[in-house]
Amino acid sequence: MNNITIIGLQWGDEGKGKVVDFFAPEFDINCRFQGGPNAGHTVWRGKEKFVFHQIPSGVLNKNITAVIGAGCVFDPAIFFEEIEQLKKFDEEIEKRIKISKYCHLIMPYHILLDKIKEETTQSIGTTKKGIGIAYEDKYARIGIRVGDLFYPEVFEKKLRANISRKNLILMDIYQAEPLSDDEIFERFLEYGEKLKPFIIDDSVFLSQVMKEKRIIFEGAQGTLLDIDFGTYPYVTASHTIAGGACIGLGVSPGYINRIIGVAKSYTTRVGNGPLPTEDKGEIGERLRSLGSEYGATTGRPRRCGPFDASVVRYAARISGAQELFLTKLDVLKEFEKIKIAVGYSNAPEFDPFIADALNPVYEEIPGFKRDISRIRDFDDLPVEAKEYIKLIEHYTGLNVKYISVGSQPDEVVIKN
Ligand code: GDP
Ligand code: IMO
Ligand code: MG
């Protein structure tokens, strides 16, 4: 058995796309198990950039078969756009992509309601991709799944019932225009035809290949955005933690055996909600500009601040991550001093219930003040960078096994 699970240990955008792409040459299958096109996972090839939203990030590697698992919510329009962009890399990429028939569809009314709610009653700062509303319908047991598209009569019944319900909400609560079901019905039947060759039962597929194939389970978002363990209600609507891989793909927890947590060398968050180490002054601004901290999906500026060791320790515990893949260390090269939050003055550890009120305690060490993006050997890292890594290990309790020093796939230092 040779599987790895890649989990974000902060508020998303830790560099999971790059990490998955880094490991992908040694693997056969790469699965997403939750979330949808709210994700923006960036992978670089020289000067060319791909931002993956729905499709797993390892797929640029031709050895990879990509699976969009049952726990995901799926927007066909975004999927086909992504396929078109990826074709310039591999004309036959479609042959390597599979979609679970159990995935819930993101319907136009989910996107519309997400937007309207964000602009009126809700203030989460969502990506407006319809994610939360699609999961609402899933749990209300009125959702429509990809597999429903192959039974037009069933699909039509479900769709019309949903649209009449949503039109009531749109008109009565939000004074918005009602939707027409005919156009949506036709459009989604067409999607169904186009989707047929991609569809699998992910649980069956994985059980057949699990013994001889090597699999990457790719988390989206981050632990602090998890629906249960994140900074609720400022979270996404799915299980972003390692356990999510089992329920989102229909595989046994016994298969999830090597969990690699990903964390940035500092902290970022996009959208609303608590961020204990947020720096609204010079440090935050410099991190944003030096780290190009703008959302890969929405382009929004990310809120930035120092690394918060308690947050990462909290997240690593929930997923059982023992190894840390530390990203974007190169971004800190301009700083005279590097600050790290090692705890809080008013709480023994990170607690999402009081995250808004936590008062971080910082340690400060000298910066390394040089370009480290060409370094590949751990011993060649500046002594100050090694010191910073040691502090992170000490306060998170994790082994920093990999250090990313640039956005290209080979810009990684492995610590033995
Ligand atoms: P994800 O959602 O976790 O996959 O992360 P995003 O792609 O949203 O954001 C991470 C950003 O940092 C992307 O633009 C990556 O290309 C970039 N990146 C990843 N690792 C590194 C690194 O080590 N150094 C630098 N400078 N950029 C990195
Ligand atoms: P990746 O996979 C960072 C945030 C949104 C918002 C909250 C809820 O690229 O790390 P949603 O649209 O999911 O209902 O929004 O979650 N969010 C992300 N932040 N990275 C992401 O994905 C995110 N996906 C959602 O900004 O605060
Ligand atoms: Mg992202």
Image: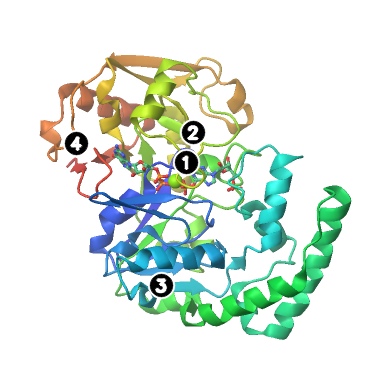
Q: Earlier in the sequence, mark 4 or mark 1?
A: 1
Q: CA distance from mark 2 to mark 4?
A: 24 Å
Mark 4 or 1: in front is 1
In three-dimensional space, the C-alpha distance between marks 2 and 1, rounded to whole angstroms, equals 6 Å
Residue underneath mark 4: 373
Q: Is residue 210 left or right of residue 411?
A: right
Task: Give the labeled residue for mark 2.
Answer: 301
Q: Amino acid at mark 2?
A: Pro
The response on whether ligand 2 sits within 8 Å of label 2 is: no
Q: Residues within 10 Å of mark 3 (few under 14, many from 20)?
A: many
Q: Are the residues tagged 1 and 3 within 8 Å (C-beta)? A: no
Q: Position of residue 52 (x, y in %)?
A: 42, 56
Question: Badge 2, how many Cα within 10 Å: few under 14, some, many 20+?
Answer: some
Q: Amino acid at mark 4?
A: Ser
Residue 362 horizontal/vertical position (percent) = 41, 16
Is the C-beta of the residue carrying label 1 under 8 Å from the nearest atom of ligand 2?
A: yes
- Which residue is tagged 1? 295
Q: Residue at x 71, y 72 (%)?
A: 183
Which residue: 39% across, 68% down?
66
Q: Earlier in the sequence, mark 2 or mark 1?
A: 1
